[in-house]
């Protein structure tokens, strides 16, 4: 499934808002917000132990 900046889907009868995170470490990073459960899934856009692979060729950076 592809999308531009945001997408709304339903999973297991729950509305899920999907947002593309520009300037993340990879150009396809997204977060999911499960609206009824009030849960935010960050995937690997948040990691507090070390730096991840940064996709420099696609314009990402350590500052993104």
Image (tube, rainbow, N blue to C red):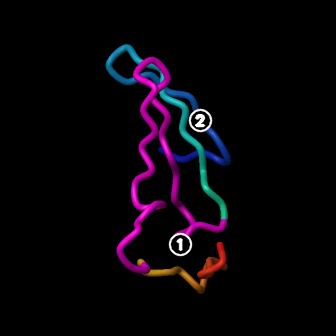
Q: Which SS class for mark 2?
A: strand
Residue 58, image quadrant: bottom right
The label number, if any, that marks residue 25 in the structure image: 1
The answer to whether residue 46 is magenta is yes
Between the residue at mark 2 and the residue at mark 1, the CA separation in whole angstroms equals 20 Å
Labels 2 and 1: the sequence-earlier one? 2
Judge left or right: residue 58 versus residue 48: right
The residue positioned 44% from the left and 22% from the top of the image is: 10
Instruction: Give the x, y percent position of residue 25.
Output: 53, 72
* Magenta span main SS: loop
Instruction: Give the x, y percent position of residue 27.
Output: 57, 67
The label number, if any, that marks residue 7 in the structure image: 2
Instruction: Give the x, y percent position of residue 62.
Output: 59, 81
Which-is-in-front pick, marks 2 and 1? 1
Q: Nearer the viewer, residue 33 or 48?
A: 48
The magenta span reads: 23-51
């Amino acid at each position: 499934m592809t999308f531009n900046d945001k997408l709304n889907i339903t999973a297991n009868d729950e509305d899920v808002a999907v947002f593309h995170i520009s300037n993340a470490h990879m150009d396809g990073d997204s977060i999911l917000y499960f609206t009824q459960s009030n849960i935010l899934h960050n995937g690997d856009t948040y990691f507090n132990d070390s730096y991840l692979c940064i996709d420099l060729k696609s314009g990402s950076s350590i500052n993104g």
